[in-house]
Image (cartoon, rainbow, N blue to C red):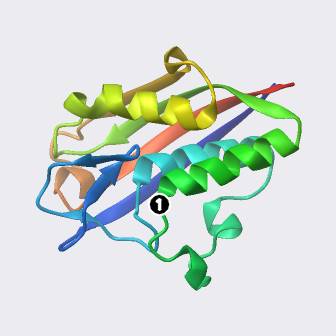
Amino acid sequence: MKIGIGCDAHRFAQGRKLIIGGVELAHSEGLMGHSDADVLLHAICDAMLGALALGDIGHQFPDSDESFRGIASTELLRRVKEMVEARGYAVGNVDCTIVAQEPRISPYVGSMRGLIAGILGCETDCVSVKATTTEGMGFCGRREGIAAMAVACLIKL
């Protein structure tokens, strides 16, 4: 078994869709990034890559490579899963926390868990997605952006 941790943060940006956990959330702003800026899937990718000491998504999918501009983070997660499987591992479970003052995340959690489990090829009960606010503290509390953390457990096949 191998365990990795991932963390990501993106600031809000006008004129973009807000995609978190592969799901579009109703909000007036999206997140700024080279890809679709899905902060949750980026944290999960980093956790999985970290478990195998493969760096992070910035190393694997650099923003200097125009082929990744606007890419859906669901595709990045699929590619990371392939890297994990190529090394003889599978995802045992992932546990994630989204840090956001707004929007409310709870209405979307079920959809996020199902989508992530489908990509990773595991049961939905192996994917935990939680959310918290910072009660007005820090950049998330000031509504400047959203952060996410994830832990992934990989099991040897």
How many circles with numbers are drawn on the protein?
Answer: 1
Pinpoint residue 139: horizontal percent, then vertical percent: 26, 58
Can you name the residue that lies furthest to the left here? 28
- The quarter of the image holding the C terminus is top right
In the rendered view, tell whether residue 76 sits above or below residue 96.
below
Dot 1: few (<14), some (14–19), or many (≥20) neighbours within 10 Å? some
Q: Quadrant of residue 113?
A: top left
* Residue depicted at x 14% and y 54%: 27
Q: Could you say whether the residue bearing mark 1 is in a helix, strand or loop? A: loop
Q: Quadrant of residue 65?
A: bottom right
Asked if residue 87 lies left or right of residue 50, the reply is right
Type of the residue with mark 1: Ala
Residue under numbered circle 1: 72
Pinpoint residue 86: horizontal percent, then vertical percent: 86, 45
Front residue (pair 50, 45)? 45
* Residue depicted at x 70% and y 65%: 60
